[in-house]
Image (cartoon, rainbow, N blue to C red):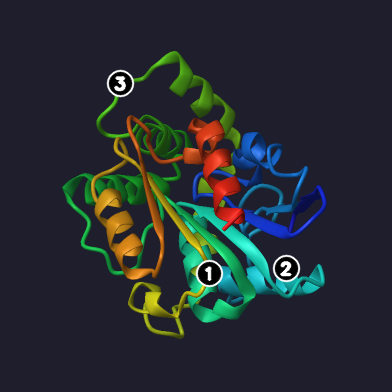
Amino acid sequence: MNTVVEGSGPPVVLVHSGVADHRSWDLVAGGLTATHTVIRYDLRGFGATPPPTDGFRHRDDLAALLDGLGIDRAAVVGNSLGGYVSLEFATRWPDRVTHLGLLAAPVSGWDWGPEVRAYGAAEGELLEAGDIDGALALNLDMWVRGPVREWSPELRAIADEMAPATRVALANQTVTESFELPDDTDRPSTLLHLIQAPTLVAVGDSDAPGYDMIARMLADGIAGAKLVELPGAGHILPAERPKEITTEIIELLAR
């Protein structure tokens, strides 16, 4: 897997969303490298990591990555899909996680509302038709602008920066998902009591409907978790609110 390791000190892994790659953490990573070894990587089928050719689980890839770096325990912080991977990892191997950050993280089995279901159906149709341009526009509109905000110059700039990574993810998505193995444990959302690490849960109040409720459920279910709700923020929090997210991660790592 394509991996970037910077800085020195206790290790912290930053796991990207499903419409990005490791570069979505650029503005956060720089604020952590003075005191921590910051590890970023491209999940399979994202960025410079090729899609899989056999069955895999993202959480197992994360374990293998740490093993390869000789790291037994690390802080793990993920956004969106990366948050789910982090949650899976923390409930499967709680003793390997020193600190946990869940930023706009989904959970499996959630009963999504009509907005998210309509997005999923539209994306499926576009990908089946081979319309990557249409799927790209749909995803940037959903996950950068969000369903309750208008486009602004700042959001357009984030979308332009993310577009190449999103295009790669979409081009590989059908293959990548076809090789992803189902959970071999109970749903992570039912195993929150196993998490031992200090935990940050963050969500923007302009994200897609449902993420706010998931964040509160995670914060309520994880002992001692801190819930941060960011007014006006959307889904890709490391790219949209890097200063606030960096501050929250620094505070988390100090716990």
The residue tagged 2 is 65
Q: Residue at x 61, y 55 (%)?
A: 253
Residue farthest to the top?
153
Which sits earlier in the primary sequence, circle 1 or circle 2? Answer: 2
Mark 1 or 2, which is nearer the eye? 1
Q: Nearer the viewer, residue 178 or 219?
A: 219
Q: Is residue 53 visible?
A: no
Tags 1 and 2 touching, CB below 8 Å: no
Mark 2: few/some/many CA within 10 Å (<14, 14-19, 20+)? some
Q: Residue at x 62, y 41 (%)?
A: 25
**In the image, residue 87 lies at what x, y percent?**
47, 67
Regarding mark 2 in the picture, which secondary structure is present there?
A: helix
Q: Please, is residue 59 above or below residue 8 in the view?
A: below
Q: Which mark is residue 109?
A: none
Q: Nearer the viewer, residue 214 or 163?
A: 214
Mark 1 or 3, which is nearer the eye? 1
Q: Please, is residue 252 above or below residue 161 in the view?
A: below
Q: Nearer the viewer, residue 233 or 75?
A: 75
**In the image, residue 114 lies at what x, y percent?**
17, 48
Regarding mark 1 in the picture, which secondary structure is present there?
A: loop
Q: Residue at x 75, y 48 (%)?
A: 35
Spatial distance from mark 2 to mark 3, Cα to Cα?
39 Å
**In the image, residue 251 lies at what x, y percent?**
56, 48
The residue tagged 1 is 197
Question: In which image quadrant can residue 71 be found?
Answer: bottom right
Regarding mark 3 in the picture, which secondary structure is present there?
A: loop
Q: Residue at x 81, y 47 (%)?
A: 7
The residue tagged 3 is 150
Question: In which image quadrant can residue 54 be found?
Answer: bottom right
